[in-house]
Image (cartoon, rainbow, N blue to C red):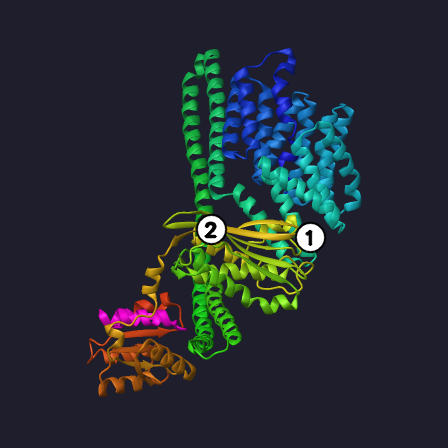
Amino acid sequence: MRIAMSIFFVVFIYCFSYGQQANGKKVNDTIEALIDKTIDLYYDYKIKESLDNAIKIIDYSHKLNNINYRYRAHYIIASNYEVAEDYKNAKHHYNSALSLAKENKDSIFIIRSLNGLGNISIELDSNMENSEQYYNEALRLSKISKLKQEELGPVLNLAWAYIDYKKFKKAYPYLIEAKELADYTGNPIAVNDVNCLMGRYYSGINDFDNAMPYFNKVIKVGTEKQLYSSLIDAYKAKSDFFEKHGESDSALFNIKQYIFYRNKFFDEEKLKQLEIAKVNFNVNEFQRELEATKKEKEYLSKITTNNIVISITSIGLILLLGAAFFFYSGYRSKKKLNSVLQEKNIELIQAKTEAENLTNVKSQFISTVSHELRTPLYGVVGITTLLLEENDIATKHKKLLNSLKFSGDYLLDLINKVLKISKIESDKEKLTKTPTNLSQLSQNLLHSFEYQSKNKNNELVLDIPKELPNVLSVDSLKLSEVLINLIGNSTKFTENGKIWLRIKIISIDKEMVKIRYEIEDNGLGIPEDKKEFVFEKFSQLGREFNKSEGTGLGLSIVKNLLTMMDSEIRLDSKEGRGTKFHFDLDLEIIDEKEDEELQPISNGIAQTFKKILVAEDNKINQIVTKNLLDIIGYTCTVVENGFNALQMVQKEDFDLILMDLNMPYLNGIEATKRIREFDKDTPIIALTAAELSEVKEECLSIGMNDIINKPLNKNDLRNIILKNLVS
């Protein structure tokens, strides 16, 4: 994006002293200060304010009859319009500045106006030949006038134009000359523009090693000094390069940054303010013309009294026509602005409709896939849980089963989070804290990675302080997901090395403990230019770093989950020296006596004979649910569909019904409706593999008492049964 900044780098210095040079007269300090402020606003991308000030300068120039101020103001206005990509208005004001500068024989502003017209010609007409003529004329005049500092503008823009048109051989000599001139002026904006062009040049000839350092310099300086135009150019060029070479992740990240800074500059409010500034400028121009006409008529009336009536009539007519023109101009400007806004509103409505349609499709997909994945997992997790309840299992087998159970729980939660990542970001997910032994949790985590570690010859090291309380309140599944993603990341990028999982106590008192989790490896490490986007969704380091690419969601999920837990992931890594992630958690300490009360209990309700009806069509799920109920202390009758459940409730009395929602012949919803026609009291708990938020409202509205997600957890199942039996 070629903009006025590249040709405007010495205006500040020149305008500051110009008033003392023009005809040897000292100009008004107030106007000079206003010019300085207007240029500062231009540099800060405050287009509307800069235009407003430039209009004031033109007003002063008319009052003082000062042509110098007038073309300087027109030049500033043109530069602002060029930045805003309003090329028609920019061309008009560059031409005005050029005409007035020629009238005043001001070589500097003749050169700059020609240079600006060269930029506009490319943008408006896509005409390289016309632009070359403007640039070469500006360069010729600057050399004839021996204005070395003015040579940079046309030289830089010639290089820019040739690179835009992929004429890299022609561009190179101008690039070298522009670099020397930029160093000569010492202006950081000019140096940054040259660096950006150097990066684009090397990128154009596929010299990646030379291109990237230039782009990184531009981004560093652009970020520090908020030079949005430089950032827009650099990120767009980097994205084009990565896309050209098939590095889609890097291309995606850089195009996101390009869009971010482009939107930051060209936001809707700025554009609206710009339209207002244009209207104000047109009104002021008209009023000046009206004043000139009025003065002329007054002068004529003094010369000849015979034309008084005609003069008055003429003035009245001019005023009337002027007012009509004023209102018409204002009406047309407002109508044009309203038309633009209406078009934008239509586009927004269309985009909203499309987004809603996509959201509905996505929700349906989530619901279907979620159910299909959770149902078989119920069998995996449930049967593993039942086997762990057996007392005669060998220790080594129990260790494997614990790892299998842990991996199953993680897989289940990962399915939920990957399919619902948009819900995580929209704060619809809630934390579910449970009493957790972090030492045991961490050991299970590392055990689940033993197989992968052996394959890559890695050593897993667990480091937990003895002072760590045994039971803490935390969402164990979300914490597990965070740790597994981080350990999995280390495993992926480490071979023949070590992976450490550490817990450090930052502070502790009777009720709370602040801990720090550290996951460190001595693997490949993360390159400096990749650190900025590793937490983005679908981001990957690329095949040169990773032989087995995944979804690119792991670190994004980690970031979102830790945000939910009021924490933040931090990264410390050097390429070739390994990586360390760490995050802090403030956790409540649970009294071990209280924790014992939360374990499976033997109260009056559990010991009392209770009959439970289970309506479930999946054979494996039937086995798992029946065995879980046996362990908890309840007997049950199992039926395969809602129709059979309806018949059983009509024949026998049950203390509670566990009703699967998705069954053949008669689903759980319809079966519950029919049961509630003759049985209002028996508690009915919905069993579902679907997302709870999607079905809970409907379940409760038809008379169900509660709802629980499959696969079932023994403690969760026991607690929900007790809750509904005593209520």
Residue appearing at x 43%, y 20% in the figure: 310
Q: Nearer the viewer, residue 619 or 129?
A: 619
Residue type highlighted by circle 1: Gly
Q: Is residue 672 magenta?
A: no
Residue 493: x and y in percent read 64, 59
Residue pictured at 63% horizontal, 18% vertical? 17
| Residue at the spot of label 2 | 515
**10 Å crowding of disc 1: few (<14), some (14-19), many (20+):** few
At 68% from the left and 21% from the top, the residue drawn is 105
Is residue 128 visible in this depiction of the protein?
no
Indicate the amino acid at tag 2.
Ile
Q: Picture coordinates of residue 391 (x, y %)?
A: 43, 78
Image spot of residue 503 (x, y percent): 51, 54
Q: Which residues are magenta?
A: 700-727
Furthest toward the front, the residue is: 466
Res 576 label? 1
Secondary element at tag 2: strand
- Please say whether residue 721 is one of the residues in the magenta stretch: yes
